Image (tube, grey):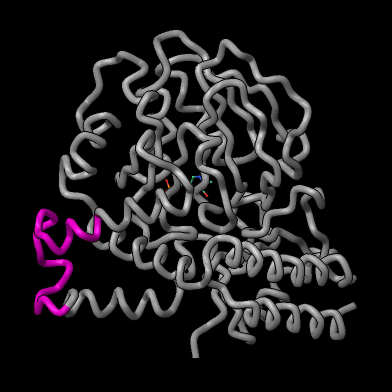
Amino acid sequence: MKKHNFYAGPAILPEIVLKEAAQSIINFNNSELSLLEISHRSKGFEAVMDESESLVKELLGIGEEYAVLFLTGGASSQFFMIPMNILKDGEKAAYINTGVWASGAIKEVKNFGIAEVIASSESDQFRHIPKNYSIPTDAAYLHITSNNTIYGSQYQHWPESPIPLVCDMSSDLFSRPVDGNKFDLIYAGAQKNLGPAGVTLVVIKKSLMGRSGRKLPSMLNYALHAEKGSMYNTPPVFPIYVSMLTMRWIKSMGGLEVIANRNEAKAKLLYDEIDRNSCFVGTVAKEDRSRMNVVFTARHQDHEPLFLEACNKANCVGLAGHRSVGGFRASLYNALELESVATLVQVMQDFEKDHA
Ligand SMILES: *Cc1c(COP(=O)(O)O)cnc(C)c1O
């Protein structure tokens, strides 16, 4: 039997997706060739690109005003590609700092313009999502990070932004319905909730491309990738294919509403136990708790290694907190079953009996 996989990323994928992906490596669509040994410009792979793009548009409810790009370099490359492509020299962009990844994005602006941090939860160890701030209308865009993968906070309401809204959705894309039209740019590294590492999804309003007027290296130019249908160079064929299979799976499950309800149920089960159990403490403000990455600590620090050992014994893996924060983190991405969370909750209850 498979282990209960709580890793934060790369992370769990639906079993049926893994099986289809494995099959495609041996014999892709009965072509008697592997997906890994055919041209990215073959008919077979072009169909994968077309379907991937239309699934992204369908799931986000967006139309022709948007370009859907499958790029490389990870979400981290978007930290600089965004200001490089959008921000004019010396112009400013507004950022909300909700954690390590948001800080990473802020850091990369300085080569192209100015990042104005209009709100931050840093002084609170990123335990909440900032609420009261005003968005400067002279900034080129507002950048937010929808889900804080490391500290475990998540936007439950989007800011009403009078300027273009840019969002890093790496760790909660397609975990709940999102109206893509509220955003001017959405990006996500695939390896949290969509597919294997190696592809980064960028959804950008076409009117925003090339806004900076800057001369750009070809590979870092959104407009060129859009013009070439993400085939300016060889795209990461296998991560794109697996991401397509995951999006098909989301649809087969009943779509994002159903996925969101599953995710709510999993998160509730675990947070209720954290709040009830005398051995554990939730670290994030309740209204901002992430449905994807549940972060908690042991009330007594010496319990930490003991609990991780108990998890391992029960085949629950990937529960150590990020190396920068310690404690525990249970990632409950789309593909994780409620049964896995129930197993973890049982381990927590048994742990309390033995150690409280
Ligand atoms: C993991 C993560 C990143 C970094 O992604 P890479 O693909 O490794 O560059 C950026 N932002 C968020 C929110 C993440 O969870």
Instruction: Let me know if residue 41 is in the magenta part.
Output: yes
Residue 149 appears in the figure: yes
Q: Quadrant of residue 304?
A: bottom right
Which quarter of the figure has residue 187? Answer: top left
In the rendered view, would you say 311 is above or below 279?
below
Q: In the depicted view, which residue is nearer to us: 16 or 51?
A: 51
Q: Is residue 223 left or right of residue 350?
A: left
Residue drawn at (45%, 62%), measured in percent from left and top?
10
Q: Which portion, as a residue range, is magenta?
A: 30-49
On screen, residue 73 above or below 141: below
The location of residue 271, given as percent across then percent down, is: 78, 65
Q: Residue at x 15, y 64 (%)?
A: 44
Look at the image and tell me whether residue 300 can be seen: no
Between 264 and 319, the residue placed more toward the observer is 264
* Residue 225 among magenta residues: no
Q: Residue furthest top?
A: 90
Is 231 situated above or below 253? above
Residue depicted at 25% across the width and 80% down the height = 23
Identified at 74% across, 34% down, the residue is 130
Classify residue 346 as left or right of residue 100: right
Q: Nearer the viewer, residue 331 or 160?
A: 160
Q: Is residue 81 above or below residue 128?
A: above
Where does the C terminus fall, quadrant-wise?
bottom right
Percent x, y of residue 174: 51, 56
Residue 143 image point, x, y percent: 55, 30
User: How many numbered discs sit on the rendered protein?
Assistant: 0
